[in-house]
């Protein structure tokens, strides 16, 4: 009951501060009414046991690209010398290069144990 009286007093005080000042000689009449207390509806909680189980969780995971070594073969070209003879000339020697594939997202699933618990419906 004390809480209700405190709330009513706070409401009255807030109302007085928000209202414009009353003219001299006028009477300010504020009537406060306590809210009606109606009985709350009765609800019966139904508890049920959920046994332990595994849940499948799908995760999106970034997989970086693979790095590998590739051999680039030597490059030769046919050229003509000053005398008009065709010669096979080495333009670029063979070499190893490092190639990195682009990364990608993959969806992976993992199984996680959820222990048994009570659930309220």
Image: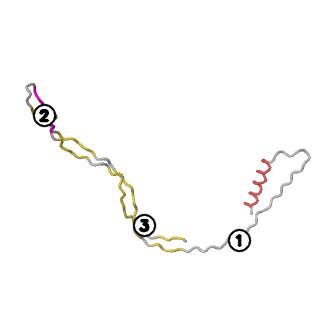
Residue 1 vs 86, above or below: the answer is below
Q: Nearer the viewer, residue 92 or 35?
A: 92
What is the magenta range? 74-81
Mark 3, residue position: 114
| Of callouts 2 and 1, the N-terminal one | 1
Q: Residue at x 42, y 67 (%)?
A: 114
13 to 36, vertically: above or below: above
For the C terminus, the quadrant is bottom right
Residue 120 horizontal side relative to residue 35, left or right: left
The numbered mark, 3 or 1, whose residue comes first in the sequence reads: 1
Q: Residue at x 71, y 71 (%)?
A: 39
Q: Earlier in the sequence, mark 3 or mark 2?
A: 2
Read off the residue under disc 2. Answer: 78
Q: Secondary structure at mark 1?
A: loop
Mark 2, secondary structure of its residue = strand
**Residue 69: x and y, percent?**
21, 45
- Name which residue lies at 7% across and 25% down: 83
Q: CA distance from mark 3 to mark 2?
A: 72 Å
- Comparing 19 with 82, the one in front is 82
Q: Dividing the picture into quarters, in which one does residue 24 lie?
A: top right
Majority SS type along the magenta span: strand
Count of labels shown?
Answer: 3
Left or right: 33 with respect to 27? left
As measured in the structure, the alpha-carbon distance from the residue carrying label 2 to the one carrying label 1 is: 102 Å
């Amino acid at each position: 009951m004390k809480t209700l009286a405190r709330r009513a007093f706070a409401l009255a005080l807030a109302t007085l501060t928000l209202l414009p000042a009353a003219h001299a000689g006028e009477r300010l009449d504020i009537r406060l009414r306590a809210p009606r207390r109606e009985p709350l509806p009765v609800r019966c909680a139904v508890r049920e046991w959920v046994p332990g189980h595994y849940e499948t969780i799908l995760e999106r995971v970034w997989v970086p690209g693979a790095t590998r070594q590739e051999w680039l073969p030597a490059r030769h070209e046919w050229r003509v010398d000053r005398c008009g003879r065709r010669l096979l000339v080495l333009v670029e020697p063979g070499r190893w290069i490092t190639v990195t594939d682009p990364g990608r997202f993959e969806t992976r699933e993992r199984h996680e144990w959820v222990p048994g618990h009570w659930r309220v419906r």
